Image (tube, grey):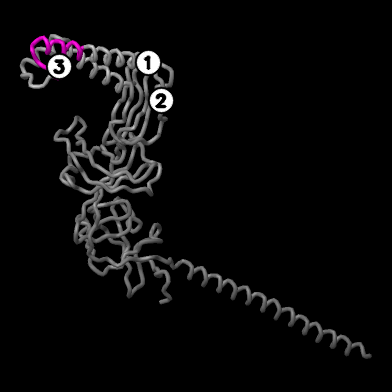
Amino acid sequence: MNKKIKIAITSVVGVVLLGAASYAVYALTHKEEEDKSSTATAVMEQTIVEVDTVVLRKQTFQKQILCNGKLVAIHRAELMCPKAGELLKSVNVKNGQRVSAGMVLAVADTRDTNNALEKAKHDLEKAKVDLQDKLIGLGYDADAKNVPADVMKKAEMTSGYYSARYALRAAETSLSDCQLIAPFSGKIADLVARPHQRGDKFCTLIDDSFFDVEFKILESELSSVKVGTMVKVSPFIDESLVLNGTVAEINPTIDEKGLVTIKARVKNTSDRLLDGMNVKVIIENSVRDMFVVPKEAVVERDGYHVVFVYDKESRRAIWTYVDILYSNLSSFAITGCEKKQTEVKVGDIVITSGNLNLADDTEVRIAGRDD
């Protein structure tokens, strides 16, 4: 083949290969730019924060005062051993046991008292014989019929019958005192007595069917509490357990710390509650016509409380200053900020989530909506 033709063909092939390579580089570069553009668009879409909202309306707010209190059983008795200092024959209960009124809790040694009772019975029989002899000596029948009351009384005293009858009653009482009887229904606590031992204190008997809850409030909060005010009581060991009660007593003095002692009564509905247990007390009062929002809706900006109101037209979060009037465990009662001269009104859509890092006039999207 001609040498010039070969050179020409080689040049054409080179140009074609160069063109293909250039197109490949161009296509790859264009694809990378498209990928970057798509990524940037996705990032821009992701910056639109999804939020939850609540519509403001007037409603009743449960104003709460939170306190710490202590449970006190309504009845509590320190029981002593029967025949204190004497040997105990039996102990019929144990700590934590529930007992009924009238139940025999313990019995002391009855040997001496039984002997004394038998002697008293014998002495009474002898005194009856002596009384009959007295009456016969006074001209009356032995069966004491038709004996004037004053004559009978004198004869009983001089014959020893009166004293013997009193001694028998005392012996019977002494025998019954050898038994410790539960004065009311309740739970045994602090049991220290043991069978076949001597002692003084036996146990503490606690009636925990109801509890008095003692707690203190500030002097400034006293206007919100009166006898009959509802309270909710929860033990710290299980705050899901809630007892309802009412204020039963307000101590009419203020201590050196400016606190007032309050006592409320609650019914015991759980075996987990114990005398002396520490509890949380919530005093509730209803306040009508309040704007109520979840606590999560309020954030702090520049030392003020702020909510973000959703503007439907611009789809943006508008920074709005507010004042908090009342609070409870989960909610705030809010109004417009007096210093900043802002206001909130019925129908405002308040953002309740996704607001921690929001700035004023930020575009947002309400969760669950496509528009």
Residue matched to label 1: 111
In the image, which residues are magenta? 127-143
* Secondary-structure class at tag 2: strand
Q: Characterize the local packing of mark 3: few (<14), some (14-19) or many (20 or more) Cα atoms within 10 angstroms.
A: some
Left or right: residue 150 compared with residue 215: left
Left or right: residue 345 compared with residue 201: left
If the image is split into quadrants, where does the N terminus sit? Answer: bottom right
Q: Does the magenta stretch include residue 146?
A: no
- At label 1, the amino acid type is Arg
- At label 2, the amino acid type is Val
Q: Could you tell me what secondary structure mostly forms the magenta stretch? A: helix
Left or right: residue 195 compared with residue 34: left
Residue at image position (19%, 31%) is 255
If the image is split into quadrants, where does the C terminus sit? Answer: bottom left
Residue toward you, 335 or 280: 280
| Quadrant housing residue 250 | top left
| Quadrant housing residue 105 | top left
Residue toward you, 125 or 138: 138
Q: Is residue 139 magenta?
A: yes
Residue matched to label 3: 142
Nearer to us of marks 2 and 1 is: 1
Say which mark, if any, is on residue 91: 2
